[in-house]
């Protein structure tokens, strides 16, 4: 039952998890800055690594700070639904531009 | 309002909301409030996704200019602001934890720290903006070589003294229109619509993000006022939870903005 779940969540303290999350976020921030100075053989790889670390950080914030880990399934589902749409929008647009940019420049 | 009115109860001598709304039970109202906030946050995520799309396309078109432009940004400032925002997110989460267990005072302290962090973030941003306005003036050879050649040929570049970290240094500054409407759609790199696409996106993205910080600060101040009036108790603290969710979103967006704007160099 959602009711008994949430009232149980009320009585528990998540402070330890929150503190650990904060520590992990700071460590990952340092890692992002340090890693950005290294060259992994290609800008695309470097940006992918930076975005991967950012996504881990975002997941930590969403799961612990925003309580998604203890949240009701319906809310988790709707929150998670925005992720594929973001990926869909960015990737289809970039794919389209990468196909058309060259043609556009020569057409003018 | 009185304690025996529908929707109200008494907690430690104060008349407070019991969490129910329009006859609906408190657990349902609490769940639906969070659900509504998350739906709103999903639309916010998509708003920023549009900006990330614009960034990706502009990056794809001129990666070299983006790398050169990003070098103008201070990683130290960006990192400091990242840590400040992460810490403020932690204090908000701590505040929610406190009010959940009936510790109103600790929640007020945590919200106070969060608001202070938000203000420090904005002050840092103001310093950065002031600095970057100068930098955008220079159409540098590294950022826009074609534009720089044209400006140089038209004698629009001159050596001028500039304060740089308190020291007077000689830099070449070119007079350039940051945004030229008549050049929209131009594929000629010496006639760009934006003198620097990177800085245009930098100001738009961090500007909209900064607007969210200001709105978030307003929300938290409103929540704090309610807290000062002892309106929250373990049975009803929805504004703290929902206001906190908004603040976390601001942090979430910054987590992506930071590497994309400051670390692409």
Image: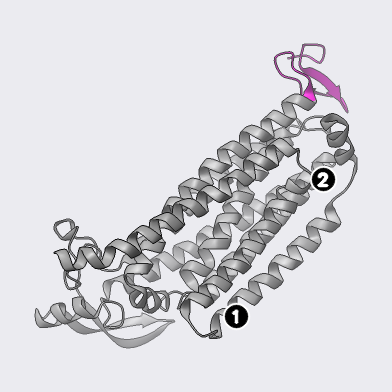
- Mark 1, Cα crowd under 10 Å, few <14 / some 14-19 / many 20+, is some
Q: Is residue B141 above or below residue B98?
A: below
Element at label 1:
helix
Please name the residue shown 60% across and 50% down the image.
B249
Estimate the spatial distance between the alpha carbons at disc 2 and disc 1, rounded to whole Å. Answer: 36 Å
> Residue at horizontal 70%, vertical 65%?
A25
* Chain of the residue where label 2 is placed in the rendered structure: B
Work out whether residue B51 or residue B166 is closer to the camera in this orientation and state it.
B51
Judge from the rendering whether residue B2 lies leftward or rightward of residue B143; answer left or right: right
Q: What residue span does the magenta drawing correspond to?
A: B1-26
Is residue A73 or residue B179 the one in the foreground? A73
Outermost left residue: B154
Magenta highlight on residue A108: no
Disc 2 is placed on an element classified as helix
The residue tagged 2 is: B98
Name the spot of residue B139 as percent of width and height, x first: 25, 76
Q: Is residue B35 left or right of residue B154?
A: right
- Image marks 2 and 1: residues in contact by CB distance under 8 Å: no
Where residue B26 sits in the image (x, y, percent)?
Answer: 78, 24
């Amino acid at each position: 039952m959602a009711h008994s779940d949430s009232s149980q969540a009320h009585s528990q303290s998540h402070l330890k998890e929150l503190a650990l999350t904060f520590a992990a976020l700071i460590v990952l921030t340092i890692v992002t800055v340090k890693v950005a100075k290294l060259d992994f053989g290609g800008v695309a790889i470097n940006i992918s690594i930076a975005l991967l670390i950012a996504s881990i950080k975002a997941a930590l914030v969403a799961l612990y700070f925003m309580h998604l880990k203890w949240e009701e399934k319906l809310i988790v589902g709707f929150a998670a639904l925005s992720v594929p749409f973001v990926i869909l929008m960015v990737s289809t647009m970039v794919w389209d531009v990468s196909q058309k940019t060259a043609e556009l420049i020569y057409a003018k | 309002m009185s304690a025996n009115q529908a929707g109200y109860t008494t907690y430690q001598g104060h008349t407070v909301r019991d969490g129910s709304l329009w006859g609906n039970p408190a657990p349902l109202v609490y769940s639906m409030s969070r659900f509504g906030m998350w739906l709103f946050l999903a639309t916010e995520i998509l708003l920023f996704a549009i900006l990330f799309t614009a960034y990706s396309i502009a990056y794809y078109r001129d990666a070299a200019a983006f790398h050169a432009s990003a070098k103008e940004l201070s990683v130290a400032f960006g990192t400091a602001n990242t840590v400040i925002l992460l810490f403020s997110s932690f204090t908000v989460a701590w505040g929610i934890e406190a009010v959940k267990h009936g510790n109103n005072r600790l929640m007020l302290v945590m919200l106070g720290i969060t608001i202070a962090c938000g203000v420090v973030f904005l002050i840092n941003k103001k310093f950065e903006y002031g600095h970057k306005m100068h930098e955008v003036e220079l159409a540098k050879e590294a950022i826009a070589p074609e534009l720089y050649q044209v400006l140089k040929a038209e004698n629009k570049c001159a050596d001028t003294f500039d304060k740089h970290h308190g020291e007077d240094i000689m830099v070449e500054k070119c007079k350039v229109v940051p945004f030229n409407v008549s050049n929209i759609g131009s594929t000629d790199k010496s006639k760009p619509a934006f003198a620097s696409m990177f800085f245009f996106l930098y100001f738009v993205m961090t500007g909209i993000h900064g607007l969210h910080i200001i709105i978030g600060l307003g929300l938290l101040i409103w929540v704090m006022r309610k807290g000062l009036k002892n309106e929250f108790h373990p049975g009803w603290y929805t504004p703290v939870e929902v206001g906190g969710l908004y603040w976390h979103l601001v942090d979430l967006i910054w987590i992506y903005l930071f590497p994309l704007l400051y670390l692409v160099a």
